[in-house]
Image (cartoon, rainbow, N blue to C red):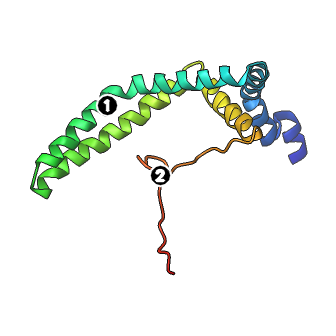
Amino acid sequence: MLKLISKLVGSKSDRDLKKLQPYVESVNAFDAALKTMSNDQLRERTVAFKESIEEATAETKASKDALYAQIDATPDYDAREPFYEEIEALDAQELELIEGVLSLPGGLDTLATDADTIARDCLAGKTARLEKARSPQPFIYSYPIYH
């Protein structure tokens, strides 16, 4: 009985595959287009994506910088709390703006371009430097040297 129902309706995995198939086709189309591009063209596109994100988030970053200046000017720690809460709200807004830029028609293209650029650079013998997200500087661990 269960096999009969699954033949009529289809299995869960078949329905999932059918729903995801348009995404697979669009990724494959991007892959074909990216393979025809040179490394320099890929790097230029990556820079363009970063610039569009910077433009979209410039206002929120300026607001956060102003709030940080107010925090530095406020000696009372309890009075700083509303500034921190506002910064958290601006962080959430900034993430939404970035997602908005990435969800534009070329958003998937952004991720594919970056992934292909990294893959080509790694294959060319270059190393990618990974940093912890939201960290202004990489973490540096220092160990004492004893003689």
- Horizontal side of 86 relative to 13 (left or right) equals left
Residue 133 location, x and y as percent?
A: 48, 47
- Horizontal side of 144 relative to 88 (left or right) equals right
Q: Quadrant of residue 96?
A: top left
Nearer-the-camera pick, 20 or 53: 53
Please give the label number shown on residue 60.
Answer: 1
Circle 2 sits on which residue? 138
Pick whichever of labels 1 and 2 is earlier in the sequence.
1
Residue appearing at x 77%, y 39% in the figure: 123
- In the displayed structure, 77 sits above or below 135; it is below
* Marks 1/2: CA–CA distance: 23 Å
Residue appearing at x 76%, y 20% in the figure: 29
Q: Quadrant of residue 46?
A: top right
Residue 89 location, x and y as percent?
A: 30, 40
Does the residue at mark 1 contact the one at mark 2 (Cβ under 8 Å)? no
Residue 103 seen from this side: no
Residue appearing at x 89%, y 37% in the figure: 7
Q: Secondary structure at mark 2?
A: loop
Give the residue type at disc 1.
Answer: Thr
